[in-house]
Image: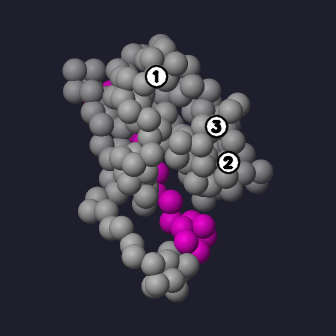
Amino acid sequence: MKKIVFILIILFTIIACSTASQNIADNSQPKKTTGNDTVRIANDSLEYEVIIIDNGFNTWLVSRALPRHYYTLAYLENKNYQYVTEWNNRVMQPQRYNPNLYEMTIDYRPEIHYGYEVNYLIYNYMIYFQNTFKQKLAGYVPQQ
């Protein structure tokens, strides 16, 4: 059976609702529309994939993320392990952390080599998430 890493993050939170109501109320500014806010990266040879569903992430990834191969694979794997470990800790503490932000655990294992694209996507989602929702998962958060 295929080993598949799914990251389905659907953020229908109070924050998203308030952002949407602010956008509706402010019609004076032109708005960019994005066709599809689902990002899918798959490493078919290893049978892993990442699916991220989050309004705004695809636009952020294209416009603000540093280019591929800016970071080494080792750097991305190290940061992803730190971020995912803290993320999973917060999922397990819904009384302390907003359960609307931390809905489900992420199955990321450092002993598995997911490849550059999968690690790049996870890393950039973690940066996007921390900057967008004013969270700090581990150490310094780049303001890309």
Residue drawn at x 55%, y 72% as measured from the top left: 19
The residues bearing labels 2 and 1 have C-alpha atoms spaced at a distance of 22 Å
* Name of the residue lying farthest toward the front: 29
- Residue at 45% from the left image edge and 45% from the top image edge: 64
**Is residue 137 toward the left or the right of residue 78 in the image?**
right
Question: What residue would you read off at disc 1?
Answer: 71
Three-letter code for the amino acid on which mark 1 is drawn: Tyr
Is 57 above or below relative to 41?
Answer: below
The answer to whether the residue labelled 2 contacts the one labelled 1, judged by CB atoms less than 8 Å apart, is no
Whether residue 59 is visible: yes
> Which residue is depicted at the point 57% across and 25% down?
79
- Between disc 2 and disc 1, the foreground one is 1
Pick the front one: 92 or 55 = 55
What's drawn in magenta, residue-wise? 1-19
N-terminal label among 2 and 1: 1
Residue type at tag 3: Val
Read off the residue under disc 3.
141
> Which is the main secondary structure of the residues drawn in magenta?
loop
The residues bearing labels 2 and 3 have C-alpha atoms spaced at a distance of: 9 Å
For the residues bearing labels 2 and 3, Cβ distance under 8 angstroms: no
Q: Residue 65 magenta-drawn?
A: no
Q: CA distance from mark 3 to mark 1?
A: 15 Å
| Image position of 23 with respect to 119: above or below | below
Quarter of the image for residue 70 reads top left
Identified by mark 2, the residue type is Gln
The residue labelled by disc 2 is 135
Residue 52 at what x, y percent from top left?
A: 39, 47
Q: Residue at x 34, y 57 (%)?
A: 37
